[in-house]
Image (tube, rainbow, N blue to C red):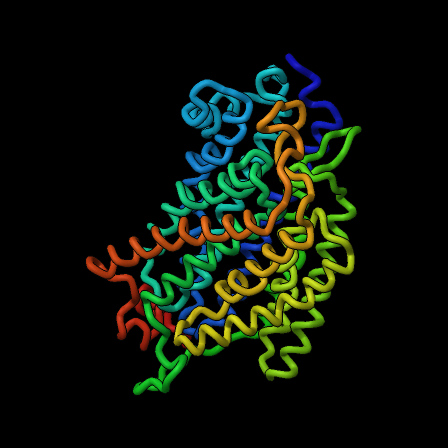
C-alpha cells in the first residue's frame, strides 16, 4: 500500500478538481434553462430531451477514448514507448490506473492517482459542455439523429483532439507559444465554428428574418428561465477556472500551461471579467432594447478573458470583461446581415473568444509558458514564449478541426435521412411531434 497517495495535500488537490468537475454540471443546467427560455413553448420538452441525451453521449464517448487522446501529450514528453497506444491502455475506464484505488498504486508509476482520476472526470465534463453548446446553437431545427452523431464524434475524437493540440502544458501548440488558460480556443472557438457551419447548412428558423406565411415565429417563452440559467453559468465559471490549474502542495500554483499564478489571482480576474461584462451587457441591453444582453453580458466578458485568467492584471481583466459583450453584439449583427440564424454560441466565439485570445497574445508577448517541471529540452519548464502568431495558429487549427467534420456530417445527413426537422414539425412544435405532448 502507498499511503502517501492519500496525503492531506493530495486529497485537497483532488478535491479542487472534484469541485471543478461538478461545477460544469451547473453550466449544463444553465445552458438548458437558457435554451428552454429562448425557444417557443411548444419546443421546451424536446429541447431538454436533446440537451441531456447529447451530454450523455458526448461524455461517455470521452470517458472511453477522449481522455486518452489528451493524455497523449504527457506520454510523448515523458518518453513513454508507443505513447499514443499506451495512453489508451492506461486511461479508459477499465484500465488499472482508472480502476485501482489511489492507495494501492505506486506513486512512481501513477503519481497523484486520485487527482489524475478526478481530472479525467473533469475532462469528461469539459466534453459534455462542448456538445451542450453545439446543441444550444442548433435548437428548434436540428433532428436528433444528426445531433447525436455530432455529439458522439465530438466526444470521441474532435473535442479531445482540439484540447490535445491547444490546451495543456505539453500540447504541441503550447510548446511553441500558444497560451490558453481556460480552453477558450478549444471550447468556444470549437463550438462556435461547429454551430456556425451547422446553422448555415440548416438555414434559419421559420420567421426569424422574414415573416412566415403561416405565422410561425421563434420567440423567447420564459425570460425567468433565461435569467436563472445565466446565473447558473455565472456561478460555475469561477469554480471551473480552478480546474485549469496545477497545484504543487507546498511549492506553487501554475496555470494549465505552467505559468506561475495563484488561486486568488485567477478568482479575482474571473470576477472582474464577469462583473465588467455584466455592466457592459446591461448598458447594451438598455441601448438596444434587447434584454438578453443583461444575461449574456457576464458570460461574454468571461469568454473574452478566459485565455488569460492566470496572467492578466486586474484592470486588463476588467477591460476585457467590458469589451466582450460589445464584440458579441457586433458579431451577432454581422450574422443577421448574412442571414445565419445562430445568435448564441458563434457570437461568443468569433467576437470575445477570438479577439480575447489574440489580444492576450499581444499583451503577454514573451511570457514564458509550456513545458513541465524536471523535464529537459524540448519540454523544459517555460521554454516557450507567448506569441500572437501561435495564438492565431491555434485559432485557425481549431476552426479547421471543427468546420471540416461539422460540414461532412451535415452533408451526409442532407443526402440521407435529413439534417433539419420537417416543415410540419416546425409548425406544430417538436413536443407534440415527437412526444405527443401538447403545451395546452
**Does 71 appear above or below 328?**
above
As rendered, which of 216 and 198 lies closer to the eye?
198
The residue sitting at 48% across, 30% down in the picture is 72
Whether residue 358 is visible:
yes
As rendered, which of 363 and 303 lies closer to the eye?
363
The number of discs equals 0
- At which x and y percent is residue 151? 39, 50
Which corner quadrant of the image does residue 155 belong to? top left
> Is residue 87 left or right of 236 when viewed as pictured?
left
The residue sitting at 49% across, 46% down in the picture is 127
The residue sitting at 33% across, 84% down in the picture is 212
> Is residue 425 left or right of 18 when viewed as pictured?
left
The residue sitting at 48% across, 51% down in the picture is 130
As rendered, which of 259 and 245 lies closer to the eye?
259
Specify the quadrant that holds the N terminus: top right
- At which x and y percent is residue 206? 35, 78
**Does 102 appear above or below 195?**
above
Whether residue 233 is visible:
no
Point out the residue furthest to the left here. 416
- At which x and y percent is residue 68? 46, 32
- At which x and y percent is residue 135? 43, 59
> Is residue 136 left or right of 26 when viewed as pictured?
left
**Does 422 appear above or below 155?**
below
Which corner quadrant of the image does residue 256 belong to? top right
Specify the quadrant that holds the C terminus: bottom left
Amino acid at each position: 500500500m502507498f499511503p502517501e497517495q492519500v496525503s492531506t495535500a493530495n486529497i485537497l488537490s483532488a478535491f479542487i478538481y472534484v469541485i471543478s468537475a461538478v461545477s460544469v454540471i451547473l453550466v449544463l443546467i444553465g445552458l438548458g434553462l437558457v435554451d428552454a427560455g429562448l425557444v417557443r413553448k411548444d419546443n421546451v420538452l424536446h429541447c431538454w430531451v436533446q440537451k441531456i441525451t447529447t451530454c450523455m453521449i458526448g461524455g461517455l464517448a470521452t470517458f472511453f477514448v477522449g481522455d486518452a487522446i489528451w493524455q497523449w501529450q504527457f506520454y510523448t514528453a515523458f518518453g513513454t514507448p508507443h505513447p499514443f497506444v499506451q495512453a489508451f491502455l492506461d486511461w479508459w475506464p477499465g484500465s488499472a490506473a482508472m480502476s485501482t484505488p489511489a492507495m494501492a498504486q505506486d506513486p512512481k508509476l501513477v503519481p497523484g492517482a486520485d487527482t489524475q482520476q478526478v481530472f479525467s472526470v473533469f475532462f469528461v465534463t469539459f466534453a459534455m459542455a462542448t456538445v451542450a453548446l453545439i446543441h444550444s446553437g442548433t435548437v428548434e431545427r436540428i433532428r436528433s439523429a444528426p445531433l447525436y452523431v455530432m455529439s458522439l464524434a465530438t466526444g470521441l475524437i474532435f473535442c479531445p483532439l482540439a484540447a490535445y493540440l491547444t490546451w495543456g502544458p505539453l500540447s504541441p501548440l503550447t510548446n511553441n507559444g500558444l497560451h490558453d488558460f481556460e480552453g477558450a480556443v478549444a471550447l468556444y472557438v470549437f463550438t462556435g465554428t461547429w454551430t456556425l457551419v451547422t446553422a448555415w447548412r440548416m438555414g434559419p428558423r421559420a420567421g426569424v428574418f422574414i415573416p412566415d406565411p403561416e405565422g410561425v415565429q421563434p420567440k423567447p417563452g420564459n425570460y425567468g428561465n433565461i435569467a436563472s440559467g445565466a446565473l447558473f453559468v455565472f456561478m460555475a465559471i469561477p469554480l471551473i477556472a480552478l480546474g485549469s490549474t496545477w497545484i504543487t502542495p507546498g511549492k506553487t500554483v501554475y496555470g494549465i500551461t505552467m505559468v506561475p499564478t495563484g488561486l486568488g489571482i485567477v478568482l479575482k480576474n474571473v470576477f472582474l471579467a464577469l462583473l465588467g461584462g455584466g455592466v457592459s451587457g446591461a448598458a447594451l441591453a438598455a441601448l438596444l432594447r434587447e434584454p438578453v444582453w443583461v444575461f449574456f453580458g457576464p458570460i461574454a466578458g468571461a469568454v473574452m478573458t478566459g485565455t488569460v485568467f492566470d496572467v492578466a492584471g486586474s484592470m486588463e481583466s476588467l477591460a476585457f470583461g467590458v469589451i466582450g459583450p460589445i464584440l458579441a453584439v457586433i458579431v451577432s449583427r454581422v450574422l443577421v446581415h448574412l442571414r445565419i440564424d445562430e445568435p448564441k454560441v458563434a457570437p461568443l466565439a468569433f467576437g470575445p473568444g477570438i479577439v480575447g485570445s489574440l489580444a492576450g497574445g499581444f499583451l503577454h508577448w514573451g511570457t514564458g509558458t509550456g513545458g513541465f517541471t524536471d523535464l529537459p529540452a524540448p519540454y523544459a519548464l517555460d521554454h516557450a514564449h507567448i506569441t500572437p502568431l501561435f495564438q492565431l495558429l491555434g485559432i485557425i487549427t481549431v476552426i479547421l478541426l471543427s468546420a471540416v467534420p461539422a460540414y461532412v456530417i451535415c452533408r451526409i445527413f442532407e443526402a440521407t435521412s435529413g439534417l433539419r426537422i420537417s416543415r410540419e414539425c416546425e409548425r406544430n412544435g417538436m413536443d407534440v411531434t415527437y412526444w405527443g405532448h401538447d403545451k395546452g
